[in-house]
Image (cartoon, grey):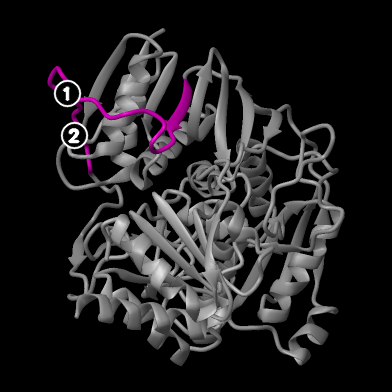
């Protein structure tokens, strides 16, 4: 089977949000990068599906040239090849991103399954995977915590208030997943070495005007909390219990 | 402004979104009955709302999913988790609500979900208009798997005692479990812990885990990455137990104890037992 996983390069933000002076982006001068937790699980799932069924997994991203780093990380886990849809520094909105992905999918060999994270770690738009599915005319199920593929069909589980709902769709399909779907593996050293020479195709789609046009980013004001230090070490325990009692939880 | 609002009548977030939408203009409130089938439900909503200026729903799992389907179907822009609307400009949540974006939607209808807890819920008032849905070949819920029984649900617990990297191991969580048990609460953890395999993902609090709003959140050995704060900022009170007085979590905490959690947490449990006699 052939599985495509779409991922997005996002900064490792740490404990604070700091913006660039023009308020258009997070200041990433001192930050490393990764892909979102949901997407790590999507990549792991794709690798497992290909291990079980044969075929190949392909990892794709729309992003700057530096996003090759994230594609190589995915290859180190097991993706067989990568596709970089290279952009300049400007962000693309969800409709534009989906459009570029659809063009790339149509240009290559057909996929049985296309996996996305349910929402990106940064923009959190909840929509790129769904838009891609509609454009390709295939079914989409989102928010998945369990996937089982058999006989050209995918049995999909998502959590609800109590328990899990089960869906079933024929392939090809788009599925979006949540962290917790699986526990992703760490890349091995041999995996990292192999990743350096796996094939990477690069395209440069032209950026359409955004329909969800970012004007500026805003860091929310803190709640103005000043943590009251109740004490140090085990000696603070009596004071802690007083506070618990005053909160009505002890 | 003509506004179509999709409402799930039993859902508090839907009633919040409906009340929010009413502040923007006249609303037509609709709902759907029957087994959940996102694409089919979305087709009905899109049909009902194609001529509206705004289509609105709650920023819940279902709301975000349904309106993304609607947006894909109508090929119009969609903004999730909006906190403010000003004409065609919205403020919406990024990074699980730890960063916001002001954005202009170019399209009609403009489609948005309302971030949880931006507006108080109000009763629907008039009965909701039920849309007819043709489920046909649409993916829909076929079966339901019951949850494993027992334990306090993380999402609903009034008290959550949570451990991070500082707990050090799976066995280290015994003291966390002990304190949670004494307080009738649930055990939570940070992503570092689940990635290390010390606790299951169902215990994870954060942007990609469970978002909680307990009366009290006790964060033990958790540094306070923004993605973790995204999951616990709904707590009424936060107590941080950490060796590092500069840990980012302290900027979000109401109370702190500085020191080694392996000494502090058992000491709190012992003090609680003593107080109960």
State left or right for residue A54 relative to residue B212.
Answer: right
Where does label 1 land, which residue? B128
Q: Could one spot residue A120 in this view of the protein?
A: no
**For the residue carrying disc 2, how many other residues have a C-alpha within 10 Å: few (<14), some (14-19), or many (20+)?**
some
State left or right for residue A130 relative to residue A215.
Answer: left
Is residue B267 a member of the stretch shown in magenta? no
Is residue B114 a member of the stretch shown in magenta? yes
Provide the residue span drawn in magenta: B110-135
Quadrant position of the C terminus of chain B in the picture: bottom left
Percent x, y of residue A96 = 66, 37
State left or right for residue B34 relative to residue B122.
Answer: left
Report the residue that reaches farthest toward the left.
B127
Q: Residue, x 25% and y 57% (percent of image)?
A: A161
Percent x, y of residue A93 = 66, 37
Where does label 2 land, which residue? B9
Q: On residue B234, which mark appears?
A: none
Q: B241 or A157, which lies in front?
A: B241
Q: B96 or A147, which lies in front?
A: B96
Q: Residue, x 74% and y 86% (percent of image)?
A: A191
Quadrant position of the N terminus of chain B in the picture: top left
Q: Is disc 1 in contact with disc 2, using a CB cutoff of under 8 Å?
A: yes
Provide the secondary structure element on which disc 1 rests. loop
Q: B236 or B258, which lies in front?
A: B258
Q: Could one spot residue A199 in this view of the protein?
A: yes
Q: Residue, x 49% and y 60% (percent of image)?
A: B206
Task: Choose top left, top right, bottom left or bottom right for residue B210.
Answer: bottom left
Q: Give above or below for B158 relative to B198.
A: above
Look at the magenta stretch and give its main secondary structure: loop
Q: B18 or B177, which lies in front?
A: B177
Q: Give above or below for B171 relative to A94.
A: below
- Chain of residue at mark 1: B
Q: Residue, x 79% and y 63% (percent of image)?
A: A32
């Amino acid at each position: 089977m052939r599985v495509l996983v779409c991922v997005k390069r996002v900064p490792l933000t740490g404990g604070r949000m700091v913006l660039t002076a023009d308020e258009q982006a997070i200041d990433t001068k001192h930050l490393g990068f990764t892909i979102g937790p949901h997407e790590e699980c999507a990549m792991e799932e794709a690798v497992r599906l290909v291990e079980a069924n044969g075929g190949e997994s392909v990892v794709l991203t729309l992003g700057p040239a530096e996003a090759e780093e994230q594609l190589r990380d995915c290859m180190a886990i097991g993706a067989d090849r990568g596709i970089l849809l290279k952009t300049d520094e400007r962000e693309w909105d969800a409709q534009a991103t989906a459009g570029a992905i659809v063009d790339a999918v149509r240009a290559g060999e057909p996929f049985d399954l296309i996996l996305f994270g349910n929402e990106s770690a940064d923009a959190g738009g909840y929509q790129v995977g769904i838009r891609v599915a509609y454009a390709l005319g295939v079914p989409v199920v989102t928010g998945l915590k369990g996937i089982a593929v058999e006989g050209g069909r995918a049995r999909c589980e998502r959590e609800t208030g109590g328990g899990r709902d089960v869906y079933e769709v024929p392939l090809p399909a788009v599925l979006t997943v949540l962290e917790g779907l699986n526990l992703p593996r760490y890349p091995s050293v041999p995996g990292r070495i192999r990743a350096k020479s796996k094939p990477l195709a690069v395209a440069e789609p032209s950026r359409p005007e955004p329909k969800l046009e970012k004007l500026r980013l805003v860091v929310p004001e803190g709640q103005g909390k000043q943590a009251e230090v109740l004490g140090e070490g085990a000696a603070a325990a009596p004071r802690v219990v007083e506070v618990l009692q005053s909160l009505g939880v002890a | 402004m003509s506004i179509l609002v999709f409402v799930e009548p039993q859902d508090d977030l839907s009633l919040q979104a409906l009340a929010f939408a009413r502040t923007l203009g006249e609303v037509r409130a609709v709902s759907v009955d029957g087994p959940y089938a996102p694409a089919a439900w979305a087709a009905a909503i899109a049909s009902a709302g194609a001529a509206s200026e705004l289509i609105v729903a709650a920023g819940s799992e279902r709301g975000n999913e349904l309106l993304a389907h609607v947006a894909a179907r109508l090929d119009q822009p969609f903004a999730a988790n909006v906190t403010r609307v000003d004409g065609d400009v919205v403020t919406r949540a990024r990074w699980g609500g730890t960063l916001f974006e002001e954005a202009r939607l170019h399209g009609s209808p403009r489609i948005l979900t309302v971030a949880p807890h931006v507006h108080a819920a109000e009763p629907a008032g008039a009965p909701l208009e039920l849309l007819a849905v043709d489920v046909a070949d649409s993916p829909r819920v076929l079966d339901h798997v019951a949850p494993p029984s027992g334990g306090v649900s993380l999402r609903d617990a009034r008290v959550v005692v949570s451990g991070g990297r500082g707990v050090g191991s799976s066995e280290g969580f015994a003291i966390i479990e002990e304190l949670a048990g004494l307080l009738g609460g649930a055990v939570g953890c940070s992503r570092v812990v689940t990635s290390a395999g010390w606790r299951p993902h169902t215990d994870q609090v954060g942007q990609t885990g469970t978002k909680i709003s307990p009366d009290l959140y006790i964060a033990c050995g958790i540094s306070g990455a923004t993605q973790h704060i995204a999951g616990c900022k709904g707590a009424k009170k936060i107590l941080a137990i950490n060796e590092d007085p500069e840990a980012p979590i302290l900027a979000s905490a109401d109370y702190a104890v500085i020191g080694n959690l392996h000494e502090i947490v058992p000491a709190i449990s012992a003090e609680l037992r003593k107080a109960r006699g």
